[in-house]
Image (cartoon, grey):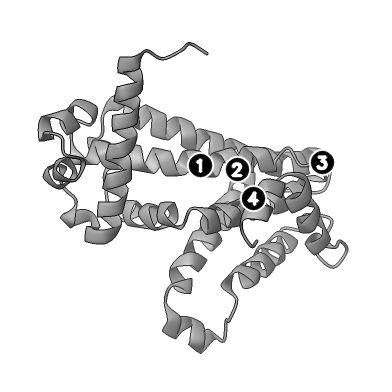
Amino acid sequence: MATLSRKQREIRDRERLILDVARRLLLDKGYLGLSMDRIAAEIEYSKGTVYQHFRCKEDLLTALAIQTKLKRVELFERAVTFDGRPRERMTAIGAADEIFARRYPDYIATEEVLYVQSIACKASESNQEAMQAVDGRCVAAVCGTIKGGIEAGDLEIPPPRQASEIAFGIWGMTFGSRIVGKTPTCMDQLGITDATTSLRRMQQAYLDGWNWRPLSHEWDYDSTRDRILGEVFADERAAITV
């Protein structure tokens, strides 16, 4: 890896500062309350300096989304190195997403704001490409695990169903549960006291519905999860409760 010059390090560090401040302002003030003027005032640089890094607000927000997605996909790519059957590796991806949510709550909160705003279409071409690249890595980790289940003979997908539908369902279940989990009234009425544990059970039941073997009554996935945390995410397990 090439050594950065002093100027390059200054540019990199300033960009990180801009993103850190933008994330905080987005969470504090919301989408409409975030502006280049406010960011410039916070970091004590001119607005022109902020525009040197990001050409518009949407470009900045896309960079925040990329930063968030990179942290998640790095955990996903570690998860799929777990030495186990394909469905165990899917359990590892679930554990990785839990770790991401617990370790980086501000990133999760930012992501929820960004998903309801149409921002990527106004971002720079380079940031749009970077977003697509990191999304591609995430899809590859999940869909590659599903294909591994098919290749191992543990999973059959009868036409017209597709393997990608499994990934779509898992993502929808995970993101949807986080939204509902932040609505105390709904959780009380549902009688759900531990959203994370309930989500794990729903994910296993969902994979059972696809007849992805070993089924949850045939395999101790709680033990698998303990192995995953010990073998793949030992540092994260020591730092947080998962």
Q: Which mark is residue 236?
A: 4
Q: Image check: 42 left or right of 159?
A: left
Mark in front: 4 vs 1: 4
Say what amino acid the circle numbered 4 marks.
Glu
Q: Are marks 1 and 2 in contact (CB under 8 Å)?
A: yes
Say what amino acid the circle numbered 1 marks.
Lys
Q: Which mark is residue 71?
A: 1
Q: Is residue 187 above or below residue 34?
A: below
3D distance between C-alphas at marks 3 and 1: 22 Å
Q: In terms of secondary structure, where does tag 1 sit? A: helix
The count of marks equals 4
Write the residue at 35% across / 42% down: 64
Give the image location of residue 61, x and y in percent. 28, 43
Mark in front: 3 vs 4: 4
Q: Are marks 2 and 4 in contact (CB under 8 Å)?
A: no
Say which residue label 3 marks: 83
Say what amino acid the circle numbered 3 marks.
Asp
Q: Is residue 223 visible in this depiction of the protein?
A: yes
3D distance between C-alphas at marks 1 and 2: 7 Å
Mark nearer the N terminus (4 vs 1): 1
Q: Are marks 2 and 3 in contact (CB under 8 Å)?
A: no
Mark nearer the N terminus (2 vs 4): 2
